[in-house]
Image (cartoon, rainbow, N blue to C red):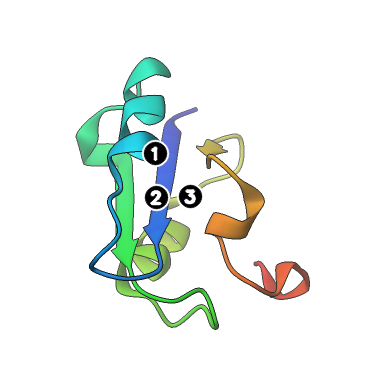
Amino acid sequence: MLSYGYVRISSIDQNEDRQMIEMEKLGIGEDRIYVDKQSGKDFNRPQYKEMVSRLQEGDVLYILSIDRLGRNNQRIH
């Protein structure tokens, strides 16, 4: 079982530091934190896709807030 973190900010102007600090507090290594700097309108995000491809049954995914995954929570897979 591995722990992963996902951080998303909506634009390049925003700062991901707050989310990264929380991931560090949880002890998640930088090599298992995936960061996207783009809108949550769809799931066509490179780091999101990479993260989903690595997740295995029993792994734990940490996000600061469910809206960091995307706007449409029913489409989260």
Nearest the viewer among 66 and 59 is 66
Please provide percent x and percent y for residue 22. 41, 27
Q: Which mark is residue 54?
A: none
Give residue 76's quadrant in the image.
bottom right
Task: Look at mark 3 in the image and give the residue it sits on.
Answer: 55
Residue located 38% across and 29% down the image: 23
Q: Disc 3 marks which amino acid?
A: Leu
Q: CA distance from mark 2 to mark 3?
A: 15 Å
Q: Give the percent coordinates (x, y) of residue 64.
A: 53, 39
Closer to the camera in the image, 45 or 55: 45
Mark 1 vs mark 2: which is more N-terminal?
A: 2
Residue position marked by numbered label 1 in the rendering: 19
Q: Nearer the viewer, residue 5 or 14?
A: 14
Q: Quadrant of residue 32?
A: top left
Instruction: Check the image and report above or below for 21 versus 40.
Output: above
Among numbered discs 2 and 3, the one appearing first in the sequence: 2
Q: Name the side, left or right, on which 68 lies relative to 12.
A: right
Residue found 54% across the figure and 36% down from its top: 59
Q: Are marks 1 and 2 in contact (CB under 8 Å)?
A: yes
Q: Quadrant of the C terminus?
A: bottom right
CA neighbours of label 3 inside 10 A, class few (<14), some (14 to 19), many (20+): some
Q: Residue at x 32, y 23 (%)?
A: 24
Three-letter amino acid code of the residue under disc 1 = Gln
- Residue in the picture at 21% in, 39% down: 31
Q: Amino acid at mark 2?
A: Val
